[in-house]
Image (tube, grey):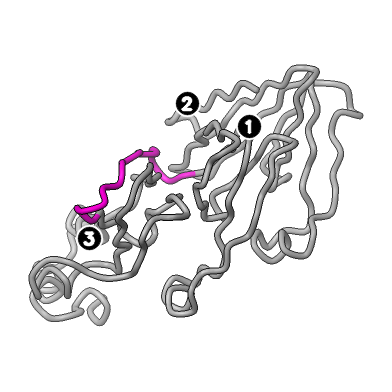
């Protein structure tokens, strides 16, 4: 499978050979298809897939063919090769497509974590195969360390190793911890995938010419960014 997703363009081109097939979890994102009509087959998702993706239907695309996926503004599609022994746990909301034949297992999150993140399940995929991951901005890969914790903003974490030690926290001095979003703290071994397109709303306000007084109050008062709009 060949995926070409130029970052500024807002679309991705997927090319499949005769032996390849993929499952697209958001069929309405397919805006163009070139190939025999019988090479696309839409199917109902299972109940777990319906719950996680809030979608009823997925599309099986068979080669030889090519198709274009329309992407949300500011997003890119990143192809990730998954080996047979992969232990990465993915936020299923980021998965746009996957190769046929890949295995997947659900992993239930701890209640406290799920309550804060609204993320009850993560998915572990086993290959060999390719995942198409939809991210805001680009995809950064960092390596975990057993002794030095890695802190990642809650909404930016795409995938992490199943055996990593993970908890929700904040860090820094009291002023820093009061003015940041909830962070994932991770230690262990293996890669962590992070989407880089998160934005600082205060910086956007400044660029839009927001009031200086409002900006100062948001920064100085505890939890000011929540109460002062």
Q: Is residue 158 left or right of residue 101?
A: left
Spatial CA span between label 1 and label 2: 25 Å
Q: Position of residue 127 (x, y in %)?
A: 63, 36
- The circle on residue 71 is none
Report which residue position mark 3 lands on.
205
Badge 2, how many Cα within 10 Å: few under 14, some, many 20+?
few
Foreground residue among 68 and 141: 141
Q: Where is residue 28, by image quadrant?
A: top right
Q: Is residue 152 left or right of residue 56?
A: left
| Mark earlier in primary sequence (1, 2) | 2
Towards the viewer: 24 or 108: 108
Residue 6, numbered circle:
2
- Within the image, what quadrant is residue 21 found in? top right
Q: Does the magenta stretch include residue 144?
A: yes
Earlier in the chain: of badge 1 and badge 3, it is 1
Residue drawn 20% across and 56% down? 203
Q: Nearer the viewer, mark 1 or mark 3?
A: 1
Image height of 110 relative to 10, above or below: below
Q: Is mark 1 on a helix, strand or loop?
A: loop
Q: Name the residue under label 1.
A: 128
Are circles 3 and 2 on residues that touch, CB within 8 Å?
no
Q: What element carries label 3?
A: helix
What residue is rendered at 58% in x and 47% in y?
Answer: 95
Asked whether, in this view, residue 227 is left or right of residue 22, the answer is: left
Judge depth for marks 1 and 2 and give the one in front: 1
In this picture, which residue range is highlighted in magenta? 135-149
Q: Which of marks 3 and 2 is nearer the N terminus?
A: 2
């Amino acid at each position: 499978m060949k995926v070409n997703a130029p970052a500024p363009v807002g679309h991705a081109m997927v090319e499949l050979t005769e032996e390849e097939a993929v499952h697209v979890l958001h069929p309405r994102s397919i805006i163009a298809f070139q190939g025999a009509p019988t090479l696309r087959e839409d199917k109902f998702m299972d109940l777990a897939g319906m719950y996680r993706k809030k979608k009823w239907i997925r599309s099986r695309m068979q080669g030889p063919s090519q198709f274009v996926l329309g992407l949300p503004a500011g997003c890119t599609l990143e192809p990730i090769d998954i080996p047979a022994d992969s232990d990465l746990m993915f936020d299923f909301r980021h998965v746009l497509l996957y190769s046929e034949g890949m295995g997947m297992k659900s992993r239930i999150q701890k209640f406290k974590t799920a309550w804060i993140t609204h993320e009850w399940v993560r998915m572990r995929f086993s290959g060999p195969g390719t995942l198409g991951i939809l991210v805001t901005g680009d995809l950064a890969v960092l390596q975990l360390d057993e002794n030095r914790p890695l802190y990642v903003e809650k909404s930016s974490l795409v995938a992490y190793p199943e055996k990593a030690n993970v908890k929700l926290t904040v860090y820094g001095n009291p002023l820093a911890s009061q003015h940041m979003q909830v962070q994932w703290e991770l230690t262990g071994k293996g890669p962590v995938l992070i989407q880089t397109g998160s934005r600082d709303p205060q910086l956007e306000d400044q660029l839009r010419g927001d009031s200086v007084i409002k900006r100062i109050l948001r920064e100085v008062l505890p939890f000011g960014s929540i109460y002062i709009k």
